[in-house]
Image (tube, grey):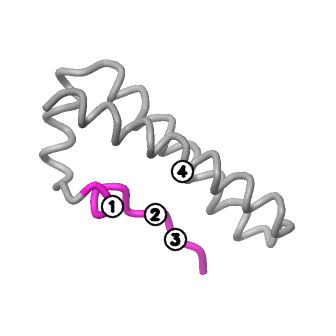
Amino acid sequence: MPVPHDLFQDLSCTKEEIQQKRTKDPLLDSLINKYSLADAEVVKAEQAKSSDDAVTKLKAKRLEVKDKIVRQLQSRT
C-alpha cells in the first residue's frame, strides 16, 4: 500500500523545526504546501495503479518541489 513520503526525514529536521521556519518564511510555507499536494498526487496515482510513466512524472514533480525547499532552507541559514 502506497504511503506518503516523509519530507521531514529527508530534510533531517523535525516537524517542529520545519514548522518554526515556515512561520517565518512565506515562500517556504508555500513550497511545503505544494510538496504535500504533489506527494498526495503520487500516493493517489500509486493506489490507482496508474501507469509507471504517470507515476514517474508525478514523482519528478515532487522531487522538483523538494529541491526548491532544500534551496530555500539553505538560503535561510
Label drawn at residue 10: 1
**Nearest the eye: 73 or 4:** 73
- Look at mark 3 in the image and give the residue it sits on: 3
User: Which label sits in the foreground, 1 or 3?
Assistant: 1
For label 4, the crowd category at 10 Å Cα-Cα, with few meaning under 14, some 14 to 19 and many 20 or more, is some
Query: Label 3 sits on what residue type?
Result: Val
Label 1 sits on a secondary structure element that is helix
Secondary element at tag 2? loop
Q: Nearer the viewer, mark 3 or mark 2?
A: 2
75, 66: nearer the viewer: 75
Type of secondary structure dominating the magenta stretch? loop
Label 3 SS: loop
Q: Residue at x 31, y 18 (%)?
A: 26
Q: Name the residue beneath numbered marker 2.
A: 5
- Which residue corresponds to the image point at 64% horizontal and 52% vertical from the top-left? 60
Q: Image point 14% across, 47% down: which residue?
A: 16
Observer-nearest of 69 and 34? 69
Q: In the picture, which quadrant includes the C terminus?
A: top left
User: Which of the two residues, 54 or 37, is positioned nearer the viewer here?
Assistant: 54
Q: Earlier in the sequence, mark 1 or mark 3?
A: 3
User: Are the residues at dot 3 and dot 2 in contact (C-beta closer than 8 Å)?
Assistant: yes
- Residue at 55% from the left image edge and 43% from the top image edge: 64
Say which label, 2 or 4, has the lower sequence index.
2
The residue that label 4 is drawn on is 63
Q: Which residues are magenta?
A: 1-11
